[in-house]
Image (cartoon, helix red, strand yellow):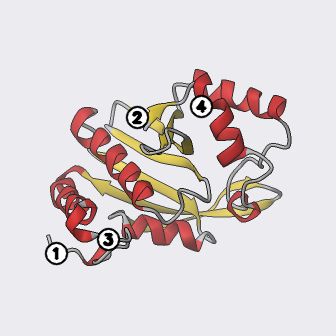
Amino acid sequence: MEKVSEKHFDDLYRNVYGPGSDDKQWTYLPIEKFASEPDFAGHLAKLINAEDPYSFAIVDNESGEAVGCFALMRINTEHSSIEVGHVVYSERLKRTRTATEAQFLLARYVFEELRYRRYEWKCDSLNASSKKAALRLGFRYEGTFRQALVYKKRNRDTSWFSIIDKEWPDLKNRFENWLSDRNFDEHGNQISPLRKIDT
């Protein structure tokens, strides 16, 4: 992962935010996909210049292309709490080893470099895929805030998940075991799923 910059413009527009992206993934995001490069240019400028959310491009090591984006947001330095959000994956990134590795690297950055004590994941309570992903990645469900937001002309109930610092060592071991080459066959398919790795 890399801090989002102008060099990612073409990749992110083509792979992630442009008209060729999957319509379904925009249902639960506060923005829509962009129909033109000039429209996306304004959005990318906001991502580059903002400190909260602080956005990262997910770069595929083999191709060198940016294939996804996510951000650290609601950064609370006083209480050492931070959230991952604005997660947007290209079709090439979804359900891949790279996607899981990117989430692992961001969590490691939060706990080991930034030294935060609480790491949050929030999503629309109707977003079953996001809730499933949070649990798979080791976040624990904490509850639902009813009518927490209004977006896209409807009420949104928000499901809250978190990882706290004392849970990180075991989760780190679980990620490292899953990401190990020995957990993948010659075709790149996982042998043991992340949620069942014995730590």
| Residue 70 or residue 53, whichever sits in front | 70
191 shown above or below 3: below
Q: Gap in Å between the C-alphas at discs 4 and 3?
A: 31 Å
Amino acid under label 4? His
Kindly identify which numbered label has been placed on residue 198: 1
Q: Earlier in the sequence, mark 2 or mark 1?
A: 2
Q: Amino acid at mark 3?
A: Glu
- Picture quarter containing residue 53? top right
Q: Marks 1 and 2: in contact by CB < 8 Å?
A: no
Indicate the secondary structure of the residue bearing disc 2: strand
What is the secondary structure assignment of the residue under circle 3? loop
The earlier-in-sequence mark between 4 and 3 is 4
- Nearer the observer, disc 3 or disc 2? 3
Residue drawn at x 27%, y 60% is 179
199 over 120 or under it: above or below? below
Judging by the rendered image, the residue that carries numbered circle 4 is 8
Task: Report the residue marked by disc 3.
Answer: 186
Q: Nearer the viewer, mark 4 or mark 3?
A: 3
Q: Is residue 10 left or right of residue 132?
A: right
Q: Nearer the viewer, residue 83 or 100?
A: 100
Q: What's the residue at 55%, 71% (across, down)?
A: 129
Give coordinates of residue 156: x percent, y percent. Answer: 68, 62
Between the residue at mark 3 and the residue at mark 2, the CA separation in whole angstroms equals 43 Å
Query: Which amino acid, by three-letter code, is at mark 2?
Result: Asn
Residue beneath disc 2: 76
Name the element at disc 1: loop
Question: Which residue is rendered at x = 77% and y = 53% of the image?
Answer: 20
Viewer-proximal residue, 189 or 173?
Answer: 189
